[in-house]
Amino acid sequence: MAFDRSIKIAPSILSADFADFGREIAAVEAEGADWVHVDVMDGHFVPQITFGPQTCKAIRPHIRTVMDVHLMIAPVDPHLKAFAEAGADILTAHVEAGPHLDRTLQAIRDFGCRAGVALNPSTPPEAIEFVLDRIDLVCVMTVNPGYGGQSFLSSQIEKIRRLRAMIGDRPIHIEIDGGVSPATAPLVAAAGADVLVAGSAVFKGGSVAAPGAYGDNIRSIRAAAESAQLAA
Ligand code: DX5
Ligand code: ZN
């Protein structure tokens, strides 16, 4: 897939019906999702447990766009192969999840996935300065990971700006995860983000039986982000 910085909306299935992932994914894709964001939580690195590689493998055939897997697990290295084999297109590991980030990122690419790295709100942008050649995406957490529906942390906007400058012409996506809505999307797009994860803001008011709200929500977030990106 060719690299570009156009705005991409990545609904997080953390806010979907867990008993109906296949149809939820089909619904958000039909309503305009560019990627599907899959949140894996271990009850250790973050407080909640969601699901593991078997569930990822089961939902893979339902994803026609891009399977963007966000690993909130530690240690992460022992599980990379299983998530790669489950069919992830992008595998994102946290800077804070282990002592050997460079090795983790090499392993993700060796297993055939695009490599992402996520930064908790307290982690400075410099944490990834010396791994830029090993990544395809940096995910800026604009909430503390672990739950959907939290408030956006505006402290992260300056981090996005610094990362955008650090990345320069490199083909690295800047993804924002947490509290994205039509109100916050322009702030992150103007600062340099191109991939916007949104859970509650996409799924609110809709269902597989009434997916129109998903489309309305996706279009609102996209329109707000695109106009800010153009103006920046
Ligand atoms: C948070 C997850 C997010 C979450 C975002 O730990 O990584 O992907 O689903 O949810 P909202 O968009 O509701 O903040
Ligand atoms: Zn996420």
Image (cartoon, rainbow, N blue to C red):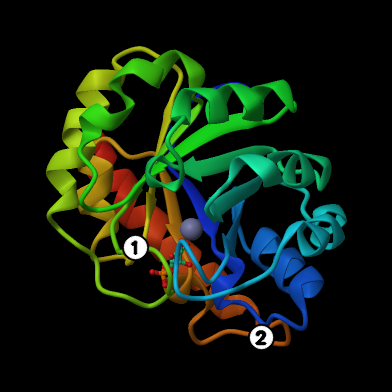
Q: Which residue in the protein does label 2 denote? A: 210
Residue 13 appears left or right of 144: right
Q: Quadrant of the C terminus?
A: top left
Residue 1 visible to the viewer: no
Ligand 1 is found in the corner quadrant, namely bottom left
Q: Residue at x 23, y 39 (%)?
A: 160
Q: Residue at x 51, y 87 (%)?
A: 205
How far is mark 2 from mark 1, CA to CA? 22 Å
Q: Are marks 2 and 1 in contact (CB under 8 Å)?
A: no
Residues 115 and 105: in front is 105
Residue 7 visible to the viewer: yes
- Residue 180's disc is 1
Residue 56 position by quadrant: bottom right
Label 1 beta carbon less than 8 Å to ligand 1: yes
Give residue 3's position: percent from left, percent from top: 54, 22
Mark 1 secondary-structure assignment? loop
| Residue type marked 1 | Val
Graded by Cα atoms within 10 Å as few (under 14), some (14 to 19) or many (20 or more), the crowding at tag 1 reads many
Q: Quadrant of the N terminus?
A: top right
Give residue 155's position: percent from left, percent from top: 12, 54
- Residue 123's disc is none
Q: Residue at x 58, y 74 (%)?
A: 49
Residues 185 and 37: in front is 37
Q: In this rendering, is residue 46 above or below 195? A: below
Mark 2 secondary-structure assignment? loop
Give residue 137's position: percent from left, percent from top: 47, 32
Residue 68 appears left or right of 193: right
Residues 131 and 188: in front is 131
Residue 29 position by quadrant: bottom right
| Residue type marked 2 | Ala
